[in-house]
Amino acid sequence: MALWKSKDVFENQKCCIVFKTNIRSASKNFNKLEQMLSILSHTFKIIGLSETWHSHFKDTITDCTLPGFNYISQLTKYSAGGVGLFIANSLNYRIREDLNSASDEEYSIVYFICTY
């Protein structure tokens, strides 16, 4: 059986499984994300979103809340683009602003996760 299909991987406390999806507008498709997470029935520690379409011109980030998570994002200057991360409240992390990127072609968030 493939490792990613093994239930043991999901139950291993030393294993952190990250979920990432291209959401194509977090405001429009956030309910679909919640449905997908419900179907997967796994408590991910990190959930990554691309194409959030959150911009400096729209106040839509408040639409994106998941219980037990902090949300950080890199906004876009346009109607497309942008990235976001949900990081479990149980994780200690630090955003590295000096390594983040927000240009006309790409967006990225760099962070460090520390577990104790």
Image (tube, rainbow, N blue to C red):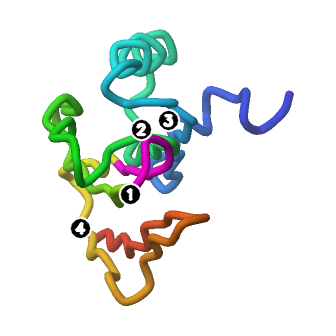
Check if mark 4's residue and mark 3's residue have beta carbons within 8 Å. no
Q: Earlier in the sequence, mark 1 or mark 2?
A: 2
**Label 4 element class:** strand
Q: Quadrant of the C terminus?
A: bottom left
Name the disc covering residue 35, or none. Answer: none
Stretch of the chain drawn in magenta: 77-85
Give the camera-side residue of 8 and 72.
72
48 left or right, relative to 66: right
Q: Which numbered mark, 2 or 3, is in the foreground of this view?
A: 2
Name the disc covering residue 11, or none. Answer: 3
In three-dimensional space, the C-alpha distance between marks 4 and 2, rounded to whole angstroms, equals 15 Å
Residue 107 location, x and y as percent?
A: 50, 63
**Label 3 element class:** helix
Check if mark 4's residue and mark 1's residue have beta carbons within 8 Å. no
In three-dimensional space, the C-alpha distance between marks 2 and 3, rounded to whole angstroms, equals 11 Å
Q: Is residue 80 magenta?
A: yes
Q: Earlier in the sequence, mark 4 or mark 2?
A: 2
Q: Circle 1 sits on which residue?
A: 77
Q: Is residue 114 above or below residue 34?
A: below
Name the disc covering residue 92, or none. Answer: 4
Name the disc covering residue 44, or none. Answer: 2
**Label 1 element class:** loop
Amino acid type for the residue under numbered disc 3: Glu
Q: Earlier in the sequence, mark 4 or mark 3?
A: 3
Amino acid type for the residue under numbered disc 2: Phe
| Label 1 Cα crowd, 10 Å radius (few <14 / some 14-19 / many 20+) | some
Q: Earlier in the sequence, mark 2 or mark 3?
A: 3
Q: Is residue 30 magenta?
A: no
Chief secondary structure of the magenta portion: loop
In three-dimensional space, the C-alpha distance between marks 4 and 3, rounded to whole angstroms, equals 21 Å
